[in-house]
């Protein structure tokens, strides 16, 4: 049983129970009952719907914001590890240093030009990026230290490659959208219900009421757009989200 079927059944049962209880209750109401003495529940229901939707929307914004922050931290860690490799490689002879520097540049260019757009569109990394990182690790590991300084730098360099590899794996795990489809269904349906309930309050054509209704609707649309924009942990623009790697290329 899929989550959508479970959701449909749960919503149908909830509506059926409430409507059945309401109908049965009204059948037992005496004829001399005065409904004007009962407080109007319309405004109360509108308020409760607005509060519940605000809580759900707030949780959604907090969730995608946290996921975006974690993704940015991982990107900075990967770029910083590559930067450390480039900096520490300067203690090697020129030929070895150039080879390591070129390995870092090739990997960085591939990530920013090829892998990142694919990660945003298809939510997956490339095999070529893995090969380039393995080449960098191999070039460092196969170079036997020739002196004490190289021996002291050898293991830290491998540690930085491992840190970049770990950050890359985390990037692969976090490439997909944060919110599942059922959450988006709830957000959109909640927005329609919340805005639609405005019309139950007998809104008039005065400029003040029209301004408030329009502003409220625009606010809901903006918040949904905000959730959608941050729902991509690594952003929707390659230039914006790869700034840490771009800075590495300019060093």
Image: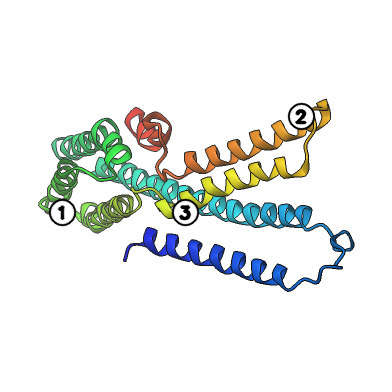
| Residue identified by numbered label 1 | 145
Between the C-alphas of marks 3 and 1, the distance is 54 Å
Q: Nearer the viewer, residue 103 or 188?
A: 188
**N-terminal-most mark, 1 or 2:** 1
Which of discs 3 and 1 lies nearer the camera? The answer is: 3
The residue that label 2 is drawn on is 211
Depth check: 192 or 57 in front? Answer: 192
- The structure residue drawn at horizontal position 33% and vertical position 62%, both measured from the top left corner, is 2
- Between residue 201 and residue 217, name the one nearer to us: 201
- The location of residue 191, given as percent across then percent down, is 59, 45
Kind of element beneath mark 2:
helix
In the picture, measured across the screen, residue 145 lies left or right of residue 169, that is left
- On the image, the x and y values in percent for residue 6 come to 40, 65
Q: Earlier in the sequence, mark 3 or mark 2?
A: 3
Structural crowding at the residue carrying mark 3, measured as other residues with C-alpha within 10 Å and reported as few (<14), some (14–19) or many (≥20): some
Tell whether label 2 touches label 1 (CB within 8 Å).
no
Q: Which residue is mark 3?
A: 183
Instruction: Please tell me which residue is depicted at 29% across the width and 41% down the height of the picture.
Output: 119
Badge 3 element:
helix
């Amino acid at each position: 049983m899929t989550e959508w079927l479970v959701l449909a059944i749960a919503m149908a049962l909830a509506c059926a129970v409430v409507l059945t209880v309401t109908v049965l209750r009204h059948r037992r109401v005496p004829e001399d009952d005065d409904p004007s003495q009962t407080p109007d529940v319309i405004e109360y229901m509108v308020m409760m719907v607005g509060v519940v939707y605000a809580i759900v929307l707030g949780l959604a914004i907090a969730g995608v914001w946290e996921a975006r922050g974690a993704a940015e931290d991982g990107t900075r860690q990967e770029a910083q590890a590559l930067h450390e490799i480039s900096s520490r490689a300067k203690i090697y002879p020129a030929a070895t240093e150039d080879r390591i520097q070129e390995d870092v540049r090739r990997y960085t260019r591939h990530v920013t030009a090829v892998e990142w757009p694919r990660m945003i569109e298809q939510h997956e990394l490339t095999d070529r990026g893995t090969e380039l990182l393995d080449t960098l690790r191999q070039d460092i590991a196969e170079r036997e230290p020739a002196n004490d300084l190289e021996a002291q730098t050898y293991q830290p360099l491998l540690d930085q490659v491992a840190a970049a590899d770990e950050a890359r794996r985390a990037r692969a795990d976090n490439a997909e959208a944060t919110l599942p489809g059922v959450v988006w269904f709830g957000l959109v349906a909640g927005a329609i219900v919340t805005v639609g309930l405005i019309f139950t309050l007998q809104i008039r054509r005065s400029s003040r009421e029209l301004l408030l209704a329009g502003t409220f609707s625009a606010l809901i649309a903006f918040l949904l757009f905000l959730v959608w924009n941050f729902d991509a942990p690594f952003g929707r623009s390659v230039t914006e989200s790869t700034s840490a790697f771009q800075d590495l290329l300019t060093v």
